[in-house]
Amino acid sequence: MYAPPLQAGNGFVATVSEALQNVGLPPGLADPLAAATVFVVVFVAVYLGGRMLLRPLTDRALDRRNLDAHAKRPIRRLVGIVLVFVAISVAFGLAGFGDFLQSLATVAAAATLAIGFAMQDVLKNFVAGIFIYTDKPFRIGDWIEWDGNAGIVEDISLRVSRVRTFDNELLTVPNGQLTDGVIKNPVAKDKLRLKFVFGIDYDDDIDQATEIIVEEAEAHEEILDDPAPSVRLTELADSYVGLQSRIWIAQPSRADFVRTRAEYVTNVKQRFDEAGITIPFPQRSLSGRPAAADAVQTRELVGEEPPAADD
């Protein structure tokens, strides 16, 4: 039973109703007006009091978790919604609307169950958004890759995240897709390793090519000296010997990554040309019977019939 709040509510309503009747209002009008007055006053008092108390506590809790500004907004909004619901519940009870509140709660519970079945995907994305805020696999401005897609995160909400691709297309991605699979965040750390395979001819000097690759890495201002650049022979392909270069850059972004790698590869290519080191490409040779093909073509031109099998 909801007896204690209901009794208190009746007492508040009776006091206000008696005061209204003393100023000349009839009981039939004073009672509902008193209940409405108690409801409004209690709602405002509980809401404002709870806001003054919960807002600082919520802010301190969020600051302790080092959440970004975009992550704090939806959590504050959720706390505000809960506070409104609590204020309405208390106001209903003290205004003497206990029976109505109980019926409303029953209807709301049934509606919530039905809506929950109908909105499973929405709720899934909502829960996924909460995990993104708490786990922080990426932030606004990060470059992420998932399921063959890549781009810069522009916005994160509780249901969807918005990612702008490198072709300037805006993707609205349900949060569930970003938490169910593997997300690559190349800029999550302060350093990023880049790898590139330089193919040289089998007749070229491997030590000389390795020295050029390392020298160009050390000469580039965006490539770190610690960890130091390194080169490993990783492939003996059909037409080339593969030398894999491994370099590191600091504070990576998509633009820095593409520019730095392009400049580095260009510089190595120019040094290879100067040193006479070739970068081979696959070559294919065609073999056949050109004499027989020419004979067939000649017969077709003059209109002769090909020889019979018995000939």
Image (spheres, rainbow, N blue to C red):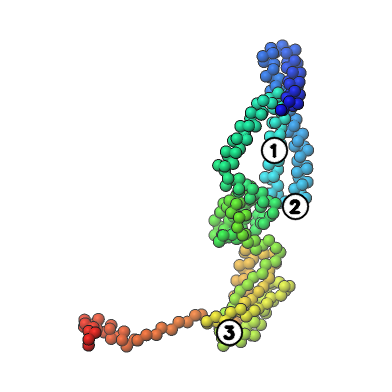
Q: Disc 3 marks which amino acid?
A: Ile
What residue lies at 55% left-to-right and 57% top-to-bottom? Answer: 168
Can you see residue 16?
no
Measured Cα–Cα span from mark 3 to mark 2: 53 Å
Measured Cα–Cα span from mark 1 to mark 3: 70 Å
Q: Disc 1 marks which amino acid?
A: Val
Please give left or right for residue 29 compared with residue 307 in the image.
right
Please tell me which of labels 1 and 2 falls first in the chain: 2
- Residue identified by numbered label 2: 66
What residue lies at 62% left-to-right and 34% top-to-bottom? Answer: 108
Q: Quadrant of residue 190?
A: bottom right
Is 91 in front, or is 206?
A: 91
Please tell me which of labels 3 and 2 falls first in the chain: 2
Q: Position of residue 169 (x, y in %)?
A: 54, 56
Looking at the rendered image, the quarter that the N terminus falls into is: top right
- Residue identified by numbered label 3: 277
Please tell me which of labels 1 and 3 falls first in the chain: 1
Q: Disc 2 marks which amino acid?
A: Asn
Name of the residue lying farthest toward the front: 1
The answer to whether the residues at label 3 and label 2 have Cβ atoms under 8 Å apart is no
Above or below — where is 36 with respect to 270? above
Kindly report which numbered mark, 1 or 2, lies closer to the viewer in this rendering.
Answer: 1
- Residue identified by numbered label 1: 82
Kindly report which numbered mark, 1 or 3, lies closer to the viewer in this rendering.
Answer: 1
